[in-house]
Image (tube, helix red, strand yellow):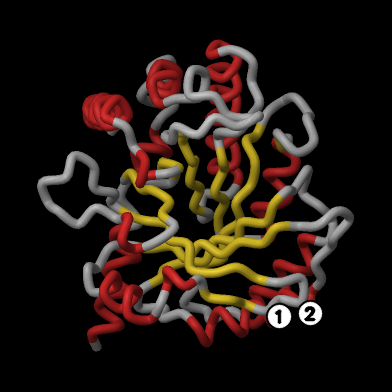
Amino acid sequence: MIRWFLGCLILYSFKTWASGAWYQATRQIPQDKGAKFIPEFVILKVGIFSKQGRLTITPEASKTSLKTHCKTGTPTIAWITHRLSAGEQLNEDAGKLLGSEISKALEPACFSAIELDIEPLSQAETWLEPFLKGVKLSLRSNFELRLAIPVLSPKSVPGHYWTLQDGVKALQWVDGLDIMAYDSGVKTSEEYKELFKNTFFFVMELNKQSPEKKIIVGLPAYPDKTKLHSVEKENLESILSTLKSFTPFQLKPYCKGDIRFSFYAGWTLSPKDIETHQQMKDWKNETCQKSS
């Protein structure tokens, strides 16, 4: 009875618009009610999988830590990763094994969905369809299956961007997408704003085509400087500035909760990011009232 109630609570919570965050361990999730940032849902890393589909639960996702986290009732997506080697392809048998092992290892009363983060994916590879079909075949029906993908863009830059056509294909194979709107390799802030604007337009088009699917847009909120990411260009201030260019009518799917935002990585939100996040919440509340 308790598991059924928690499952219903998770499903209900995901119908409303909310801000979430990715975490690599439960200890990173803010628990203090007085914290300046508390995610309304989380995407928690629980494991990695092999080419054969074998699941390995991470040390940080022990049964004890997961049990404690699950008691909080926070809507949670299980984040499971795989790093592709050069030329590697996954097949349907690997998918079946992975789906079966996930079903045995994770409690549906705690997790509403499974997010597979397979990198690098330069496009919606043809082998992805049978692999994901295999996962779906053996995955518990309680779990939704989600796929993390690169940012969407009219440009075609293998390994950095996916086209809208790639997004359309991928959405046919899973229950939802987690679009990583960061690590884009842009050269200027204006280029990033234009890229995010195109991505958001594409996301709304995907929502129009498949309103039953849930889409999360991952936003940049971390200080790491890599070859593809720069905090001076990819940041929440650029996101907020871009969002303000949309009309309340255009933002209806976002206000209804069909499109949600999640921060990567929530555990490193800087004071500036926390301030901008609050500004985003204030803007969202005002804008969504106008769209209703």
Q: Which residue is drawn at 53% across and 18% down?
A: 193
Above or below: residue 241 compared with residue 19: above
Q: Mark 2 points at which residue?
A: 93
Tell me the crowding category of disc 1: few under 14, some 14 to 19, or many 20 or more residues within 10 angstroms, Cα based: many
Q: Which residue is drawn at 61% across and 61% down?
A: 81
**Who is closer to the viewer here, 24 or 197?**
24
**Who is closer to the viewer here, 115 or 254?**
115
- Residue 54 occupies which quadrant of the picture? bottom right
Left or right placement of residue 41 versus residue 205 in this view: left
Q: Residue at x 35, y 46 (%)?
A: 267
- How far apart marks 1 and 2 lie (CA) works out to 5 Å
Q: What's the amino acid at mark 1?
A: Lys
Q: Mark 1 points at which residue?
A: 96
Where is residue 163? Give x, y as percent.
Answer: 73, 35
| Quadrant (top left, top right, bottom left, bottom right) of the N terminus | bottom left
Residue, far left: 34
Where is residue 137? Give x, y as percent.
Answer: 67, 79
Residue 287 visible to an observer of this rendering = no
Residue, far right: 87
Left or right placement of residue 28 versus residue 86 in this view: left
Q: What's the amino acid at mark 2?
A: Asp
**Who is closer to the viewer here, 241 or 7?**
241
Would you say the residues marked 1 and 2 are in contact, meaning their CB atoms lie under 8 Å apart? yes
Where is residue 87? Give x, y as percent.
Answer: 89, 55
Above or below: residue 26 compared with residue 120: below
Q: What element carries label 1?
A: helix
- Residue 203 occupies which quadrant of the picture? top right
| Quadrant (top left, top right, bottom left, bottom right) of the C terminus | top left
Q: Is mark 2 on a helix, strand or loop?
A: helix
Residue 144 visible to an observer of this rendering = yes
